[in-house]
Amino acid sequence: MILNIAMDGPVGAGKSSIASAVAKALGILHLDTGAMYRALGLTAIRRGVDLADEQAVTALCHTLHIAVAHGEMGQRTIVDGDDVTDYIRTPEVSMAASTVARYAGVRQEMVAVQRRLAQETPMLLDGRDICAYVLPDAPVKIYLTASAEERARRRWLELQQKGDASTYEEVLADLKARDEQDMNRAVTPLRPAEDAVIVDSTALDFDQVVQAILNIVKEKHHE
Ligand code: DC
């Protein structure tokens, strides 16, 4: 059977980097599903599509070919043959991704691609709706979280290293706004799936979180 691991959690819980490390340790691929919504958000901004216009954003999504490739440098995200990986992590694109991810037609299309990829290859998918919706039969489900203040602190440090001038207060406000939007949208809002194991990383360092998740994977496989 193909080993799929489903991981969800709010912004800044460290999902992407933790998911990468866990997938590497298990020798499986990591699919960062948020990158797909980010690629759409970026393209909408670049083309001047009004993000609040559900129909226009959904129509744009239907015309695009959003693909992912896995190589030495991890996941690359590609829109119509153009590698956009280096442009999708700005605060503006983060908020745009959260906005376009509210639209049912967009989600339908993204989820279809994600399910197809997961059927073909063993992989760990991280996102917001993976446990409850994209892969409801995944043998291992994790909800990775941390306090809003700790998530903002980590995100702020990361942005600072990149030379971004945002203050901690701005990052915290931005994170809370995205939490609010992700957790309260009409379609598959973010919340822990009933059968997901909750991992709270507030007081854990990176290696401890990776180890905790590897332990859960091991346990689930012996059940
Ligand atoms: O994980 P991330 O921060 O890169 O995700 C960007 C946005 O995309 C996030 O605000 C919510 C949305 N998203 C989603 O709705 N469903 C997913 N499976 C992944 C991300």
Image (cartoon, rainbow, N blue to C red):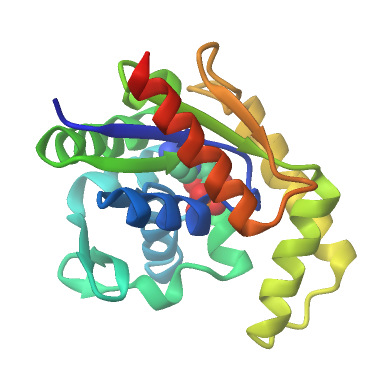
Considering every residue shown, the one lying at the far right of the view is: 169
Residue closer to the observer: 66 or 199 = 199
Q: Position of residue 223 (x, y in %)?
A: 37, 13
Residue closer to the observer: 40 or 2 = 2
Q: Position of residue 213 (x, y in %)?
A: 51, 39
Residue closer to the observer: 59 or 191 = 191
Is 45 displayed left or right of 118 in the figure? Answer: right
Q: Position of residue 75 (x, y in %)?
A: 30, 64
Residue closer to the observer: 158 or 23 = 23
Considering every residue shown, the one lying at the far left of the view is: 120
**Residue 46 falls in which quadrant of the image?**
bottom left
Q: Residue at x 67, y 45 (%)?
A: 178
- Residue 152 in view (yes/no): yes
Is 178 displayed left or right of 23 in the figure? Answer: right
Q: Quadrant of the N terminus?
A: top left
Q: Residue at x 28, y 44 (%)?
A: 59
Q: Position of residue 173 (x, y in %)?
A: 83, 54
Where 100 sits versus 194, above or below? below
Q: Residue at x 68, y 83 (%)?
A: 161
Considering every residue shown, the one lying at the far front of the view is: 222
- Residue 52 in view (yes/no): no
Where 219 sits versus 121, above or below? above
**Residue 73 falls in which quadrant of the image?**
bottom left
The number of numbered discs placed on residues in the rendered structure image is 0
